[in-house]
Image (cartoon, rainbow, N blue to C red):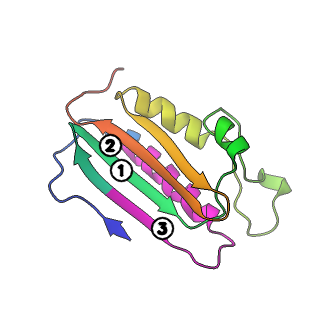
Amino acid sequence: IVDLDPDSPPIHGVFIDFSQVIGNLLRNAIDAMHEAEEKVLKVQSRHHNGRLVLRISDTGYGISDDAKKNLFKPFFTTKPKGKDAAPGEPTGTGLGLSHSRSILARYGADINVESEVGKGATFTVTIPLHRRPVT
């Protein structure tokens, strides 16, 4: 489900930065729904108070409270790593969310997660509309 705000003003940034962040969140959402009976991926954008708010939601397995505490730390993953995965099972390195948070910080942007085990997750990215990245 794609629900983008048609009236959002443009944001200033480097395409590959936002492409990496959004691509990572989409891949994670798809991976989380690997074994879900109902697979619904929703991408929503809105602008509010000088910020673009992007939400990516899935109906996957969700994230435990313990995992949420470590989710943005380098090398932390809830997915099996390469050789430990069953055939066809999604794998992870634990670098995607950590790297995404670092990229977003250069723009004064933030990323947060809301999740309940068994009910999926929603990642919210909040980006200032009129700020250029710090290099």
Amino acid type at image mark 3: Leu
Closest to the observer, 134 or 114: 114
Q: Report the residue that reaches farthest toward the top.
A: 135
Q: Position of residue 116 (x, y in %)?
A: 62, 56
Q: Residue at x 62, y 62 (%)?
A: 31
Q: Earlier in the sequence, mark 1 or mark 3?
A: 3
Q: Residue at x 66, y 69 (%)?
A: 34
Badge number at residue 122: none
Q: Residue at x 57, y 64 (%)?
A: 30
Q: Are marks 3 and 2 in contact (CB under 8 Å)?
A: no
Q: Which residue is mark 1?
A: 54
Closest to the observer, 29 or 124: 124
When the figure is inspected, residue 20 is found, relative to residue 60, above or below; the finding is above
Badge number at residue 41: 3
Judging from the image, what secondary structure is the residue with disc 3 in?
strand
Q: Residues within 10 Å of mark 1 (few under 14, many from 20)?
A: many
Badge number at residue 15: 2
Q: Is residue 43 left or right of residue 101?
A: left
Magenta region: 18-44
Q: Position of residue 7 (x, y in %)?
A: 14, 55
Please state which of the two labelled residues, at mark 2 or mark 1, is closer to the viewer.
Answer: 1
Amino acid type at image mark 2: Phe
